Image (cartoon, rainbow, N blue to C red):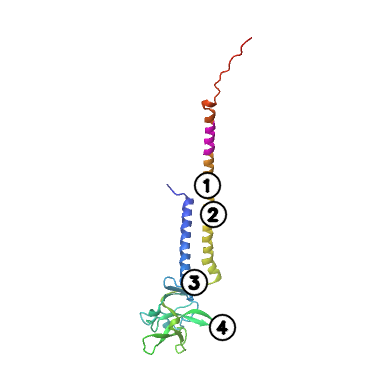
Amino acid sequence: MKKTKKQIIEIIIDVIAVILCVLLLIVAINVIASSGKGYTAYFGKLYLPVESNSMWSSDEANRKPTTDTMLGSFKKGDMLVVDELDDEEKQNLKVDDLITFKMVVGEGKDRVEILNTHRIVGIVRSLDGEKILTCLTRGDAAAVDSEPERSPIDFVVGKVEKIKVDGGGFGLWISTPSGFFVAIVLPSLLVVAYFVAMLIITFVQRNKAKSAIDKEEMRKQLEAEIREQLATKSSPENVDTEAETPKQQD
């Protein structure tokens, strides 16, 4: 049996709604799992749009990697794919690695933690040399002789795995109020509205079906009563079989 255009459209809408629900569920699960971290990781990866040019050197030669394992500089509008590290993995960090770490900005009520990504230029180890205590970091745009920032190992979130050139435009846009509304809030509202509408339609159709069943049962009941009445009237007991006798003449 061929499906009508209406049925095909309904199937497509259902598929889209299910996909949106799955995506929203994934986001919700990851937000809950990352609660208290100050960032949200998706399957162990952070996707961070670059918001400044602190890692974009004015010297083109300094922007290129010097080793096979070293990542080059990045600029505003790029996207960073950061591999979230556990305590053991943090101990494998080395100079020239790009790391994302928590950074405290402001004081008092204005004190907040933000994520920053810079290159490791030095490492401070424990007295026995076995554990990394602090990473010394600096942006590629800063002067080579400038004072590096000290990032305690506990503040390190992850290591940059990949740089997607110009891939952070969407991330920067979604971080704006209008982008967040269009990309997150609006689809969520549409999904909720769709399922509410489906619930109402199902409820109405069920009531219609129940009403039709009730009407059919009532019709059958009336027909049965009518047949019973007709059968009762036509039964021999209720037929007047007494013949009319002729009057005698005087």
Q: Amino acid at mark 4?
A: Gly
The foreground one among 126 and 77 is 126
The reply to whether callout 2 and callout 3 are in contact (CB within 8 Å) is: no
The reply to whether callout 1 and callout 3 are in contact (CB within 8 Å) is: no
Q: CA distance from mark 1 to mark 2?
A: 15 Å
Q: In the rendered structure, does residue 155 fall within the stretch colored magenta?
A: no
Q: In the rendered structure, does residue 221 fall within the stretch colored magenta?
A: yes
The mark that comes first in sequence, 4 or 1, is 4
Extreme residue in the right direction: 250
Crowdedness near tag 2: few (<14), some (14–19) or many (≥20) residues, C-alpha within 10 Å: few
Q: CA distance from mark 1 to mark 3?
A: 50 Å
Q: Which residue is mark 3?
A: 171
The mark that comes first in sequence, 1 or 2, is 2
Element marked by disc 3 = helix
Which mark is nearer the camera, 4 or 1? 1
The mark that comes first in sequence, 1 or 3, is 3
Looking at the magenta stretch, what is its main secondary structure?
helix
The image's mark for residue 200 is 2
Is 180 drawn above or below residue 210 in the view shown?
Answer: below
The image's mark for residue 108 is 4
Element marked by disc 1 = helix
| Residue 45 horizontal/vertical position (percent) | 42, 73
The image's mark for residue 210 is 1
| Residue 183 horizontal/vertical position (percent) | 51, 66
Magenta residues span 220-229
The mark that comes first in sequence, 4 or 3, is 4
Crowdedness near tag 1: few (<14), some (14–19) or many (≥20) residues, C-alpha within 10 Å: few
User: Residue at image x 50%, y 73%?
Assistant: 172
